[in-house]
Image: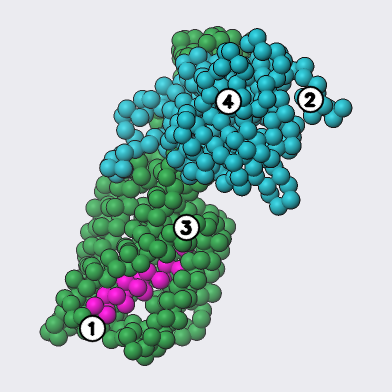
C-alpha cells in the first residue's frame, strides 16, 4: 500500500483540496446574477406597456398567476421533496374564502384576500398533520384525495358556495377601471406577490431551517437521527406553501371575477404546479417561475391555436417527458450543468496544471503530517488510503 | 474485570459495578411472525466501548432501531441516564445525547460535504432563519472533517464520494451533533483494512475523550481489540455478555455463531 500508490493518492487528494476552495455553484459570478435580476425586474415592469393587446396582457397575468402558484408549491415540493398533486386545494380555498368573505361578509377585497389566505393556512394545519404521516406515493394519493373531497363539498353545498353555477366576485376596482387597466394592475399585484414569495424562499434556502428541510428531502430518517424535528419542519413548510398558494388563488379570483369548483379544485391545476416546478427545477429559486412561463405560454398558445381540444394536455405531457429524459433535475440545473462543462477549470477537480501539481506535492507532504487531529494511534492510521483520499469523479 | 463468568443480562457484575448509560428492559419487536427482538434486557456501560455482536438476523439492527426510536417497539422500555426514552421520536432521542450511524451508510447525497455537516447543527427555534453557513458552525465542521480526514472534500457533493469517504462523512455528521453516546451499525462493513484502522483509531480517541460507544460489528478482530464490554445477541435477545476475552470463549457464543 505505501510507496508507489502513495504519491498518486496524496496528489489527487491535494488536487481535490485545491479545487475545493472554489465554489462549485459559482458558475455564474454574482455581478452577472445581479445584472440578470435587474433586467428581469425591468422586463416584468415593462411588460404591460409593451404587450401588443389586452389578450396578450391577460396571458401575462395568467402566467404570473401560475408562477405564484408554482413558487408557492415549491415551498413544500422543492425543500422537502413531498410532491403534492393536490395543491389546487389551497389555491381553490384561497380563492373561495376570499370571494365568500367579500360576497357574504362584505369585507374589503384586500382584507378578504389576506384573511382568506390565513384561513386556508389554518385549514392546512390539520390536513398537514394527517397527510405528512405518510411519505412518497402515499402522500401524493392523500393530497389528491383532499382536493377531490373539496370539489364534492363545494359543488354540493350550493347554498353557500354557489355550487356548480359558480360564484361571481365583484371587481375590487371601481367601474371606471377598464379591462386593460385592470389586467395591468393585476399583473403587477401578481408580480409583487411573486417577489415576496421568491424572497422568502431564498431566505429559507440559505437558512438553518432550509438546510433541515433539505436534509428531510435527502433522507428523512437520517435527518431525524441527527436531531432534526422532521415532522414540525415539514408542517411549517406545508402551511407556508398552502398560505402562498392560497394568496395566489385569492388574487386570481379577484382578477378573474368568477369561480367554479370544477376549475378551482381540479387535479389538472395541481399537476400544472408540479409540472412547472419540475420543468424549471425544484431546487432552484427561479425554477418554478421559469417553468410557469414555459408551460403557461404553451398552454395558452395551444388553447388559442387549437381551441377547446385537449391538445394542450398532450403537448404539456410531451414537454414533461422530454425534460425528464434530458434534464431530470429541470432546466435551470441542466443549463448551469452545461455552462459548467464549458468551464473545465471550475468544474473538474482533476483539472490542475503540472506546476500546480508540483506545488501541491511539496505542500501536500507537509499537511499530511500535521493534521492527524485527535487520532490517538498517530501516524500509522494516517497511511494514505486510496479509499479515502482518492479523487472525485465529477 | 475480575468477574470471569458472564453475568445475567441487565445486571452489573457485583463489586466493580460499572455506570450504566443506556439500558433496555424486555424490549420486543415482531415483524409479522418473526420475533426480531425478543424481550431483550441489556445494560451498556457508560463511558466505555460496548460491542453488540451476534449472527446475521439475530436482531441487532432492529434493536438499534428500537432504541433510537426509528421503530416503535411492541413492548419493553428503553432508558438513558436514568430517564425513559421509550417510544420517543428519533429527534428527541438524538437530542437526549444519542447519535447513530446506519448499517448501509446514510448521508445526504445531493448536499455538499460541508452542508452534510451543517445539517446536524441544532438551532434554537428563534434562530431558524439565520444563515446555515454560520462562521462558528463552519469552523467546527472543518475541525471535525479534518479529524475524520476528509477536510479537502468539503465542497464536493456527498454522492460523489467513495464509499469509505461516505462512511467517514457519516461519522463526522454524527460528531457534529455532539452526542455523548454514539451507536455505530457495522462501522467496518464494506471498507478496506486501512480505513478500518482509521475508524478504530477514531473510536478509541473519541472514547478517551469521554464518549460512549455501542458498536454492532461482525469483524471479530476489531470487536475484540476495540471493546471493553461485549454483548452477544442470538434470536433477538442477549445470550451472554462480559469482557471480550471471556465472551470469546463462551460455549453459548460458539454455538450461536457456528451452530454446533
Q: CA distance from mark 1 to mark 3?
A: 34 Å
Mark number displayed over residue A304: none
Circle 4 marks a residue in which chain? B
Mark 1 chain: A
Majority SS type along the magenta span: helix
Can marks 4 and 3 be said to lie on one chain?
no
Please, which residue is most extreme toward the right here? B260
Q: Nearer the viewer, mark 1 or mark 4?
A: 4
Q: Which chain is green?
A: A
Element class at badge 4: strand
The numbered mark at residue A103 is: 1
Residue in the foreground of this view, choosing between B122 and A268: B122
Rendered cyan, the chain in question is: B
**C-beta proximity under 8 Å, tags 4 and 3:** no
Sequence-first tag of 1 and 3: 1
Judge whether residue A318 can be spotted in this image: yes
Q: Quadrant of residue B161?
A: top right
- Seen at 71% across and 16% down, the residue is B5
- First to last magenta residue range: A84-101
Could you say whether the residue bearing mark 2 is in a helix, strand or loop? Answer: helix
Marks 1 & 3 on one chain: yes
Mark 2 or 1: in front is 2
The disc numbered 2 marks a residue on which chain? B
Q: Report which residue position mark 2 lands on.
A: B252
Q: Nearer the viewer, mark 3 or mark 2?
A: 2
Q: Which residue is mark 3?
A: A132
Tell me if label 1 and label 3 are in contact, CB under 8 Å: no
Up-down: is A289 above or below A252? above
Amino acid at each position: 500500500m505505501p510507496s508507489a500508490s502513495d504519491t498518486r493518492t496524496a496528489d489527487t487528494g491535494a488536487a481535490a483540496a485545491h479545487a475545493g476552495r472554489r465554489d462549485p455553484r459559482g458558475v455564474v459570478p454574482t455581478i452577472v446574477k445581479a445584472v440578470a435580476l435587474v433586467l428581469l425586474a425591468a422586463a416584468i415592469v415593462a411588460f404591460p406597456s409593451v404587450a401588443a393587446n389586452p389578450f396578450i396582457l391577460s396571458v401575462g397575468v395568467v402566467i404570473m398567476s401560475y408562477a405564484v402558484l408554482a413558487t408557492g408549491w415549491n415551498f413544500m415540493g422543492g425543500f422537502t421533496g413531498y410532491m403534492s398533486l393536490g395543491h389546487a386545494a389551497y389555491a381553490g380555498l384561497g380563492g373561495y374564502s376570499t370571494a365568500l368573505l367579500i360576497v357574504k361578509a362584505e369585507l374589503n377585497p384586500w382584507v378578504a384576500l389576506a384573511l382568506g389566505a390565513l384561513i386556508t393556512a389554518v385549514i392546512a394545519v390539520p390536513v398537514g398533520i394527517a397527510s405528512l404521516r405518510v411519505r412518497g406515493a402515499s402522500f401524493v394519493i392523500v393530497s389528491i384525495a383532499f382536493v377531490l373531497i373539496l370539489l364534492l363539498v363545494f359543488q354540493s353545498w350550493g347554498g353557500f358556495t354557489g355550487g356548480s353555477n359558480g360564484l361571481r366576485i365583484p371587481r375590487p376596482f371601481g367601474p371606471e377601471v377598464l379591462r386593460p387597466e385592470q389586467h395591468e394592475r393585476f399583473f403587477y399585484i401578481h408580480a409583487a406577490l411573486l417577489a415576496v414569495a421568491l424572497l422568502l424562499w431564498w431566505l429559507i434556502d440559505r437558512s438553518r431551517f432550509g438546510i433541515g428541510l433539505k436534509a428531510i428531502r435527502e433522507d428523512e430518517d437520517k435527518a431525524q437521527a441527527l436531531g432534526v424535528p422532521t415532522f414540525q419542519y415539514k408542517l411549517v413548510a406545508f402551511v407556508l406553501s398552502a398560505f402562498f398558494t392560497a394568496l395566489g388563488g385569492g388574487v386570481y379570483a379577484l382578477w378573474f371575477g368568477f369561480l367554479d369548483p370544477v376549475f378551482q379544485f381540479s387535479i389538472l391545476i395541481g399537476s400544472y404546479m408540479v409540472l412547472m416546478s419540475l420543468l424549471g427545477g425544484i431546487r432552484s429559486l427561479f425554477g418554478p417561475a421559469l417553468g410557469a412561463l414555459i408551460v403557461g405560454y404553451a398552454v395558452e398558445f395551444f388553447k388559442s391555436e387549437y381551441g377547446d381540444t385537449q391538445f394542450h394536455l398532450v403537448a404539456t405531457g410531451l414537454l414533461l417527458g422530454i425534460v425528464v429524459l434530458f434534464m431530470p433535475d429541470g432546466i435551470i440545473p441542466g443549463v448551469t450543468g452545461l455552462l459548467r462543462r464549458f468551464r473545465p477549470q471550475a468544474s473538474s477537480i482533476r483539472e490542475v496544471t503540472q506546476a500546480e501539481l508540483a506545488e501541491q506535492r511539496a505542500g501536500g507532504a507537509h499537511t499530511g503530517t500535521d493534521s492527524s487531529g485527535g487520532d490517538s494511534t498517530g501516524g500509522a492510521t494516517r497511511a494514505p488510503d486510496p479509499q479515502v483520499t482518492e479523487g472525485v469523479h465529477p | 474485570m475480575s468477574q470471569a463468568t458472564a453475568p445475567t443480562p441487565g445486571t452489573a457484575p457485583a463489586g466493580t459495578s460499572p455506570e450504566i448509560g443506556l439500558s433496555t428492559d424486555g424490549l420486543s419487536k415482531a415483524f409479522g411472525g418473526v420475533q426480531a427482538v425478543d424481550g431483550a434486557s441489556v445494560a451498556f456501560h457508560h463511558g466505555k466501548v460496548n460491542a453488540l455482536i451476534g449472527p446475521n438476523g439475530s436482531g441487532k439492527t432492529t434493536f438499534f432501531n428500537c432504541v433510537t426510536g426509528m421503530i416503535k417497539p411492541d413492548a419493553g422500555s428503553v432508558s438513558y441516564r436514568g430517564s425513559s426514552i421509550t417510544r420517543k421520536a428519533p429527534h428527541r432521542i438524538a437530542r437526549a445525547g444519542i447519535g447513530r450511524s446506519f448499517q448501509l451508510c446514510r448521508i445526504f447525497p445531493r448536499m455538499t460535504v460541508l452542508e452534510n455537516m451543517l445539517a446536524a447543527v441544532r438551532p434554537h427555534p428563534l434562530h431558524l432563519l439565520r444563515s446555515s453557513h454560520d462562521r462558528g458552525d463552519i469552523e467546527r465542521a472543518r475541525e471535525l472533517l479534518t479529524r475524520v480526514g476528509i477536510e479537502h472534500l468539503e465542497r464536493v457533493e456527498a454522492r460523489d464520494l467513495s464509499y469509505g469517504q461516505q462512511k467517514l462523512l457519516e461519522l463526522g455528521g454524527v460528531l457534529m451533533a455532539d452526542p455523548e453516546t454514539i451507536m455505530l451499525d457495522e462501522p467496518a462493513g464494506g471498507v478496506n483494512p486501512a480505513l478500518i484502522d482509521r475508524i478504530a483509531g477514531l473510536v478509541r480517541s473519541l472514547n478517551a475523550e469521554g464518549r460512549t460507544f455501542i458498536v454492532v460489528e461482525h469483524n471479530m478482530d476489531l470487536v475484540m481489540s476495540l471493546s471493553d464490554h461485549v454483548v452477544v445477541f442470538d434470536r433477538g435477545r442477549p445470550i451472554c455478555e462480559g469482557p471480550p476475552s471471556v465472551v470469546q470463549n463462551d460455549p453459548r457464543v460458539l454455538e450461536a455463531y457456528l451452530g454446533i
